[in-house]
Amino acid sequence: MFIQFALLGLLAGTDFEVADQAEFKKLFAADAKVDRLATGMQFVEGPVWMPAGFLVFSDIPANELKRWDPKGGVQTYRSPSNNANGNTLDKAGRLLTAEHGARRVSRTAADGTVETLVERFEGKLLNSPNDVVVKSDGTVWFTDPDYGLAGRSKEQMGNFVYRLDPKAKTVMPVAKDFDKPNGLCFSQDESKLYIADSGTPRHIRVFDISRDGAVTGGGVFAKIDKGGPDGIRCDAGGRVWSSSGDGAQVFAVDGHLIARILLPEGAANLAFGGADGKTLFLTARKSLYMVPTKVRGARRR
């Protein structure tokens, strides 16, 4: 399938829908525009900015991890990828990947070796890990809906959110009452964990996280009215950015809508990156987009 590697330029008609003008001005310049960087892929997901200065993202049906950089455009980063979905970095800058095909969360070592971090809970195979984040204490938190089972037997009793402690080699559910848990992110100070439910509820919930890792709360933070929430990210100011059927939606700390980033394709995920950390990358169906912002993503301590 042909992929346009070069920058495709400004998209006519792509715009923002602003709900809170004062907050919007804190996020975007008056002349901010969305660029489409590449298209012609199958279904892209899981963007993460790498320390070496390029973006890694997944093309799930193509069974590939892709990479994008300003000079080389889009190239294959890893094939096969075990139908990789969400990606993140651990504290050492290593790539962690939620793999549908292998029903695991993997870690890529500095030499390129891919190892399994977790594939079972209580001796039973996971469903199909979807998204993954890492807390500053090194624990790995991931969602496990059943989207990627592809006809294989479901061994877990439900679609849970898990916490893996690589040092203690323990994995435990932190939330069991989701329909289809999907994207997740920590606030900058890690006192809050946001989790998207892309199933019937189509909302984002927020949990309080204590210093010892205990999880409480879980009330609805925001609802997505176009499509459903998939990938989500917090910025350094505590706002929540969510993919949606109309592109992406940005919510204030109190949960009210600030703005929509309107795309011609529904977005599945998003991530901050670029040389200054202020570029928002969006994976949307067959295409990769970017838009400059004034803010950076939340960073682990």
Image (cartoon, rainbow, N blue to C red):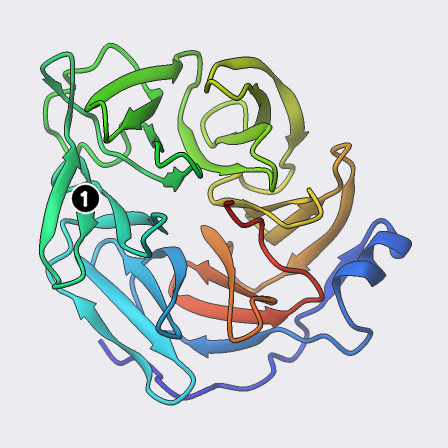
Q: Secondary structure at mark 1?
A: strand
Quarter-wise, where is residue 22 in the image? bottom right
Indicate the position of residue 96 as horizontal and vertical percent values.
27, 48
- Kind of residue at disc 1: Ser
118 horizontally vs 258: left or right: left
48 versus 154 height, above or below: below
Residue reaching furthest to the right? 22
Closer to us: 111 or 101: 111
Indicate the position of residue 133 as horizontal and vertical percent values.
40, 40
57 horizontally vs 254: left or right: left
- The residue positioned 68% from the left and 48% from the top of the image is 250
Instruction: State whether residue 40 appears in this view.
Output: no
206 horizontally vs 83: left or right: right
Closer to us: 210 or 263: 210
100 horizontally vs 53: left or right: left
Quadrant showing the N terminus: bottom left
Quarter-wise, where is residue 9 in the image? bottom right
13 versus 160 height, above or below: below
Closer to us: 111 or 152: 111
Q: Which residue is mark 1?
A: 106
Indicate the position of residue 249 as horizontal and vertical percent values.
65, 48
Give the number of callouts.
Answer: 1
Indicate the position of residue 92 as horizontal and vertical percent values.
32, 53
- The residue positioned 82% from the left and 74% from the top of the image is 30
147 versus 214 height, above or below: below
Instruction: State whether residue 287 appears in this view.
Output: yes
- The residue positioned 42% from the left and 68% from the top of the image is 287
User: Callout 1: 10 Å neighbours few (<14), some, many (20+)?
Assistant: many
